[in-house]
Image (spheres, rainbow, N blue to C red):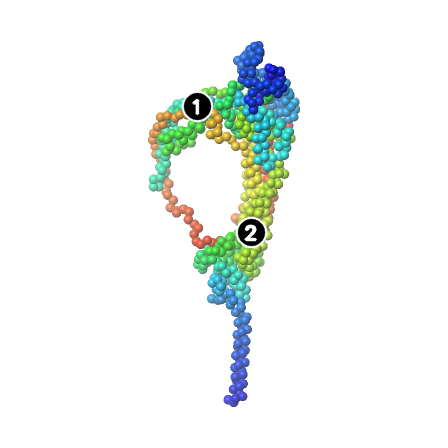
Amino acid sequence: MTGREVMTVLRAIRKALISFICLASFVSVMTVPVYASDFSIEEEYDDYIVCRNNDSGYLILIDDMADLFSVDEEDLLLNDMRRSSDGGSVVLVTAYENNYGSAYDFCRRYYNSLLGDENGVMFLIDMDTRELRFYTGGAYARKLPGSTLDLITDNVYKKASAGNYYDCAGAAFTQLGDVLEGKRIAAPMKYISNACLAILLALIINYFFARAVSKAGAASNSEIMEAIDSRFSFTNPSVAFLNETRVYSPRSSGSGGGGGGGGGHSSGGHSF
Amino acid sequence: MIACPNCGANLRFDPAKQRMVCDFCGSDFDPVQFDVKADAEEQHIKEQDKDADTYDVTVYTCPQCGGELLSVDSNTAAAFCSFCGASTILNARIAKGRRPEFIIPFSKTKEDCKQAYFKLVNRSPFIPREYKSKECIDGFRGIYMPYWSYDVSQNGPVTLNGETTHRSGDYIITKHFRLSGSIDAAYEGISYDASSSFSDSISEALAPYDIHKRVPFEPSYMSGFYADIADVNKSVYSKKAAGFAYDRSLDRIKSETREFARYTIKEGSRPQGKDAPGSAFASRTEKSHSCMFPVWFMSYRNGDRVTYATVNGQTGKVAADLPIDIKKYLIFSGILAIIIFVILNSFLILTPKNVLIGAGALTVLVFIINWMQRMEIKKKVTGEDDIGLKYASNARAKKTGKGSKKKEALDIEVPEAAMSGGEGIILAAGCISVAITLLMLFLIKPVNDMPYYVMCVIDAVIFALSYKSTLRNYNLMATRRLPQFDRKGGDDRA
């Protein structure tokens, strides 16, 4: 091989290397920024992605068993979910079949088997019971009470009814992120409902108040006794046994009370 | 009229001084010793009156309702009726009044009475303004109400049922015992009002009167005051008095007899039946005394309704009908609603389902309140809970020949408690709405929130319409029909 040919090969290799580097750089620019700065993928299958928030260490998981999202939609949803993963794990599950009876039971079992009592929030789109449901655990159960979760599902259920599951899940996690960041979310019916109930309650309370104020208390027996003359003596008290009755009443085998337990959970949902 | 021995002017009994005073010359006299100053002939007549158990009175009769009041002052023109509130000159006639045995003289002045009443009405934010007006409050009139005062004694052996209960394995074992002993008890001065125009609810609210302060009756105590007529027989409340004595003795046996402390004395010990519990503990009503107890009485007439305000003339305790001013009531409700709204918003986010449950439950509650109000109005009008009124109604029915049976006499039509056509429609709409609500919540379970909110609005409308009846009923309960006495006169509107 002549020197000219060697130079040509070297130039081609250099060109190929530059192209590879450029391509690699381009690929890394196109893909890595989505995850790299905040979370990294731990597992990825067709409809199952597990990531971890690099800062907090919490999981971000999508389990699309009902196959409602495309790959691109899942990627975008991961971004929406990331916002809520600073204080706990975030899970999005869609189910085509629910063998647990209710969406709540499905959530409880899924969440407990995955996270136990750890901080976290799970959002389920249950195609079997046609229900959207949030389920939280740990610190998130306190931060996200059932009423707030109900409000979010109230706000997004129409999207699911219309078949826009990606929009529904996206909006749900966006609003969830807003709540966790202390922002207000739209609650138009909250004010109308509360105003209506406040008026009805006020009228009822006022009625009982008026009755209480107008009621003249009758004298007690002791007051009457003070106002009259009385004497009383009771002598020769005696007690005679007559008979005995027995009633069969087995002790309750149940432990009574109980319940509660666990690290505290909250839940909220809506049909669609 | 009881004339001042010094100047001849009218004397009146002064509650603050507890003496007869002459407003003209300023003299005052002991009400008991006062008669001694009368001349011998007059004294003789008075002694005869005492023997005959009567005294001279002027009977004032209302031409509108037929209500009667007694007075020892013959030269006073009564310008309004305390029973129906009519502003009219009452007809007067001289008569002989039955002399009661005892009287508790007024010890609270009209000023004391007004203050006590003011205290009560100031506590009620919804009372119409006219009830606080000077003209209204000046209408307080001192009236001696007739009472029967019973002396009940219990003397003899007592037998009660007692039991103890404990658990042994899977069995609850109850041991039954006979508890016995001897009782020697007496209750003197158990009092009930003897006028059918004075409802039991008012007399119970004004009680108690301190029986120790009663004195033998002297007409001089009545000077400057009026008296109501006793039209309830002394036998009417004697069982109730015996029942009261029984309950108090039973209480004391339970609490004071150490030997019985470990036993539960069964309520079944209370004798059942027609004479119960008067027959228990060998109870005997030894005596019943006719008495007069002091009441400051005010009536306020508003259209065809009247309200009463009463103040115990001995203790100053107040009992009054307190109707509501709807405008004030709604303003107050509005302020309360704002406060509740702020509180609800601070912590409560309700799902449409829960809002519907809340609205539906409150609507049902209003229906229940309405129903209870109607029952109460009916009781009040028919006198079901007023033994004296029941007795007087029966007596009148027998006298007029209307209804020989007791039940018929009490079978009074109560239009106030009846449901109007509009209210019937609201009730029907309410029932349908509740049925739809239940169907929606447990069967249909609509996915969309809108049906829930629509039902909430329907419930709220039914609530509002029904609540209108609640307010109307409230004022019916807080006011009274114009009285209609079967004595003289009469008012077609009553």
Disc 2 residue crowd, few under 14, some 14–19, many 20+, Cα 10 Å: some
Q: How many marks?
A: 2
Residue at the extreme top of the image, as rendered? B41
- Given the image, on which type of amino acid does mark 1 rest? Ala
Picture residue at 54% right of the left edge, 48% below the top: B354
Disc 2: host chain: B
Amino acid at pointer 2: Pro
Q: Is residue A247 left or right of residue A144?
A: left
The subunit letter for the residue under badge 1 reads B
Q: Residue furthest toward the right? A: B88
SS at circle 1: strand
Tell me if residue A117 can be seen: yes
Q: Is residue B396 visible?
A: no
In this rendering, the label closer to the viewer, 2 or 1 = 1
Q: Earlier in the sequence, mark 2 or mark 1?
A: 1
B396 over A47 or under it: above or below = above
**Residue B76 in the image: above or below residue A192:** above
Q: Return the x and y of residue A272 as percentages of the image width and height.
A: 55, 55
Residue at the disc numbered 1: B186
- Residue at 54 percent across and 78 percent down: it is A19
Question: Label 2 vs label 1: CA separation?
Answer: 70 Å
Q: Position of residue A23 (x, y in %)?
A: 54, 75
Q: Position of residue B243 (x, y in %)?
A: 46, 26
Q: Residues within 10 Å of mark 1 (few under 14, many from 20)?
A: many
In this view, the residue farthest toward the bottom is: A2
Q: Residue at x 35, y 28 (%)?
A: A238
**Label 2: which secondary element:** loop
Residue B337: horizontal and vertical position, in percent? 59, 44
Q: Quadrant of residue A216?
A: top right
Q: Which residue is mark 2?
A: B446
Q: Nearer the viewer, residue B341 or A251?
A: B341
Q: Nearer the viewer, residue B46 or B457?
A: B46
